């Protein structure tokens, strides 16, 4: 029996280190020291009227229900992106998400949303997020990740007349996608 098991093990082709794609980003909690890099990404990502200042970040992160996380590039340990979310009784609300311009379309945004998905529970069943109607990249990003546009919101922005598109992703929709992918 023992020999048989060993023989079976030997048959498995070893995975060479070169065949394994090294992890590009890791997601971890945001710490105070990240703030300069976070602000730099924020500055490049949003027009001035939508931009959060350091005080805005601190104000939001002081809320008991708000959590900030960053995607760190593994090789350089630089902050490549961040997101902040708030846990409510029945849903998770994504408050903001951004990736630094040099890391866009490399999967950092997707990885952060994957982490966010893992925060849903049987009680906290969905993730919601408002996207400015003009933000084409974000509209495509959230659609690609399975979010559904469920409503148009008027008058949500102080400084412009733009509408916001309310996106939502439920646990059932996540499961359905996983099953059919
Ligand atoms: C939206 C944003 C966070 C996406 O981050 P990202 O790391 O570039 O996204 P990913 O590489 O994980 O992309 C995942 C998928 O989303 C879609 N996508 C992302 N950006 C896209 C774009 N500019 N155009 C079309 N599709 C896009 C693609 O399907 C992509 O998969 P693919 O690259 O295999 O085709 C990033 O563009 C960003 O920071 N924008 C500025 C800030 C912002 O608008 N935040 C959201 C509103 S608060």
Image: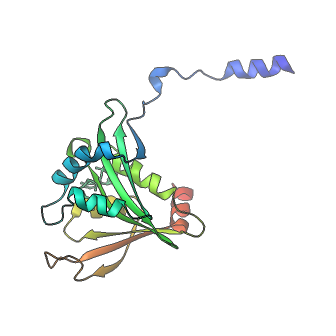
In the figure, is residue 104 to the left or right of 145?
Answer: left
Residue 136 versus residue 83 in the image, above or below: below
**Where on the picture, by quarter, is residue 156?**
bottom left
Residue 103 versus residue 117 in the image, above or below: above
**Where on the picture, by quarter, is residue 11?**
top right
Residue 159 versus residue 115 in the image, above or below: below
- The residue lying at 32 percent from left, 46 percent from top is 32
Counting labels gives 0
- The chosen color scheme is rainbow
Q: Is residue 140 visible?
A: no
- The residue lying at 26 percent from left, 48 percent from top is 38
Image coordinates for residue 50, horizontal then vertical, percent: 18, 65
In the figure, is residue 23 to the left or right of 123?
Answer: left
Closer to the camera in the image, 48 or 127: 48
- The residue lying at 52 percent from left, 55 percent from top is 118
Closer to the camera in the image, 6 or 61: 61
Residue 111 versus residue 84 in the image, above or below: above
Q: Of all residues shown, which one is farthest toward the right? A: 1
Quadrant where the N terminus lies? top right
- The residue lying at 47 percent from left, 28 percent from top is 20
Image coordinates for residue 62, horizontal then vertical, percent: 37, 61
Closer to the camera in the image, 109 or 94: 94
Image coordinates for residue 181, horizontal then vertical, percent: 51, 54
Image coordinates for residue 143, horizontal then vertical, percent: 35, 63
Q: Is residue 123 visible?
A: yes
């Amino acid at each position: 029996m023992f020999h048989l098991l060993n023989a079976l093990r030997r048959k498995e082709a070893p995975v060479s280190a070169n065949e394994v794609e090294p992890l590009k980003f890791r997601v971890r909690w945001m710490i105070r020291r990240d703030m300069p890099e976070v602000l730099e990404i924020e500055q490049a990502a949003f027009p001035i009227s939508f931009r959060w200042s350091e005080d805005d970040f601190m104000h939001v992160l002081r809320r008991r229900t708000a959590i900030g996380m960053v995607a760190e590039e593994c090789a350089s340990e630089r902050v490549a992106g961040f997101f902040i979310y708030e846990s409510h009784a029945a849903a998770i609300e994504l408050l903001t998400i951004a990736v630094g311009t040099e890391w866009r379309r490399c999967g950092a945004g997707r990885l952060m949303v994957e982490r966010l998905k893992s925060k849903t529970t049987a009680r906290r069943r969905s993730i919601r997020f408002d996207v400015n109607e003009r933000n084409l990249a974000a509209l495509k990003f959230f659609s690609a990740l399975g979010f559904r546009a469920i409503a148009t919101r008027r008058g949500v922005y102080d400084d412009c007349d733009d509408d916001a598109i309310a996106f939502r992703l439920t646990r059932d929709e996540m499961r359905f996608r996983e099953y059919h992918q």
